[in-house]
Amino acid sequence: MTRERDGAATVIAQDGDRVQVEHRGEKLTVPMKGFPAGFSLTPGSRVILTDEPSGPVARTLVRAFTSRVDAQAVARRGTFEAAGRRLQMQPSTVVESLERPEQTDAAAEYEVWITEGGADQTPSQVVAVRRRP
């Protein structure tokens, strides 16, 4: 049975699909689970540790918000600003587009999911974006 540990862990480093984290003064290296394939975490990002039958794993800890975003910025998958934050997409960022012929605005409303991180983590990493209908 999967069980969440008490509190979030802070990423120290990542090596492939494993991540070294600090949790309550203890350093652990655990596999990542529930992230887009190829997603890279930066030091300072926070994850949730869960105990599974195979051992502890790091799972995504994200915050979602809605903001107007330049559709070209989403298509480029680079760095952009939204809701007063500097955000960084990756090639592995999940993009769900609800494009319709009548939706041709340069900017549109998007739901944006970013990794939780420390106050000094800039830019925030985008895990997924979805254009709102």
Image (cartoon, rainbow, N blue to C red):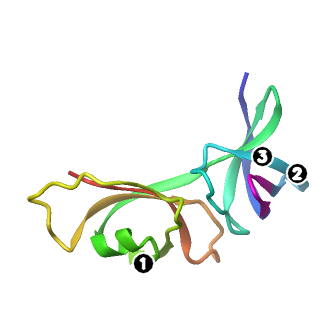
Task: Sort mark 3 into few (<14), some (14-19) or many (20+) by Cα contacts within 10 Å.
Answer: some
Residue 84 seen in render = no
Residue at the limit of the structure toward the left, as seen here: 102
The image quarter containing residue 82 is bottom left
Indicate yes or no whether the magenta region holds residue 17: yes
Q: Which residues are magenta?
A: 14-19
Query: Observer-nearest residue: 128 or 47?
Result: 128
Considering every residue shown, the one lying at the far top of the view is: 1
Q: Amino acid at mark 3?
A: Pro
Residue that badge 1 annotates:
80
> Which residue is the site of mark 3?
31
Q: Secondary structure at mark 2?
A: strand
- Which is more N-terminal, label 1 or label 2? 2
Q: Local crowd at mark 1 within 10 Å, few (<14), some, or many (≥20)?
A: some
Q: Quadrant of residue 39?
A: bottom right
Mark 2–mark 1 Cα distance, whole angstroms, equals: 33 Å
User: Of discs 3 and 2, which sits in the foreground?
Assistant: 3
Residue at left offset 11%, top offset 58%: 101
91 displayed left or right of 49: left
Q: Position of residue 68 (x, y in %)?
A: 28, 69
Q: Is residue 110 left or right of residue 57?
A: left
Residue 73 position, x and y percent, is: 36, 75
Look at the numbered disc 3 and give the secondary structure of its residue: strand
Quick check: 58 above or below 130?
A: above
Discs 2, 1 touching: Cβ within 8 Å? no
Between 91 and 41, the residue placed more toward the observer is 91
Q: Is 18 included in the stretch rendered in magenta?
A: yes
